[in-house]
Image (tube, helix red, strand yellow):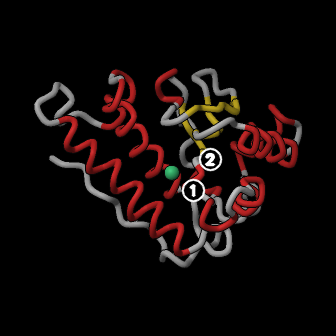
Amino acid sequence: MKFELPVLPYAKDALQPAISEQTLEFHHGKHLLAYINKLNELVEGTRFKGETLEAMIRSADGAIFNNASQTWNHIFYFETFSPKGGGEPKGVLAEAISKKWGSFEKFRQEFSDAAVSLFGSGWVWLVESRDRSLSIINESNAGNPLREGHIPLLTFDVWEHAYYLDVQNRRADHIKGLWNIIDWNIVAGRVIKD
Ligand code: MN
């Protein structure tokens, strides 16, 4: 079975001004599609044909890892947002954030700083470990924390293609806007359940 471009759970203009319609047209409709098409091509005739994206992220290297991970990362990223997003998490996730960072505001600051200062292209992640602790992790290029056994809860894409059409080189301005479109119910749904 071939991987296909998932339909976005919102209209392409629904996340403005945080992410413009034009950026979504390119980022989802061209960048993500290109990773998916490339991955379908690459797995032909290899042991990865028919495997899940997660299996490829855990055990592939080189181009198959890069394209599988970029596919997974983008789907996860786009699924996090909602035009009704923003605010703060509630419940178990809010408690875990307070336990680690003292307050949501301190977590947001640290996550934003990590995203702004990540050198080059990559992803910043909020992850949960098996011991239920939370961490912020920077990954370069196609990096994905599943590879180290962490559970991804939230990610920001800091590749320039994620924001250049909207704010050019001002990555910090883009990061600021993303907090207004995070659907915390979706993020909370990713927390490990007993
Ligand atoms: Mn991207």
Residue 84 spot, x, y in % from top left: 64, 72
x and y percentages locating residue 56 in the rendered image:
32, 29
User: Is residue 107 shown left or right of residue 71?
Assistant: right
| Residue assigned mark 1 | 162
Query: In the image as oriented, which residue stretches furthest toward the front?
Result: 169
At horizontal 15% and vertical 46% (from top left) the residue drawn is: 1
Residue under the image location 57 percent in, 61 percent down: 81
Which of the pair 119/96 is nearer the observer? 119
Label 1 beta carbon within 8 A of ligand 1: yes
Residue flagged by tag 1: what amino acid is it?
Ala
Q: SS of the residue at dot 1?
A: helix
- The vertical placement of 187 against 150, above or below, is below
Mark drawn on residue 23: none
Residue 170: image x %, image y %?
75, 57
User: Looking at the image, which is closer to me, 97 or 23?
Assistant: 23
- 164 is higher (above) or lower (below) than 50: below
Residue for point 53% across, 67% down: 23
> Disc 2, disc 1: CB below 8 Å?
yes
| Whole-percent x, y for residue 2 in the image | 18, 48
- Cα distance in 3D space between marks 2 and 1: 6 Å
Residue type at numbered disc 2: Val
Give the labeled residue for mark 2: 158
Indicate the secondary structure of the residue bearing disc 2: loop
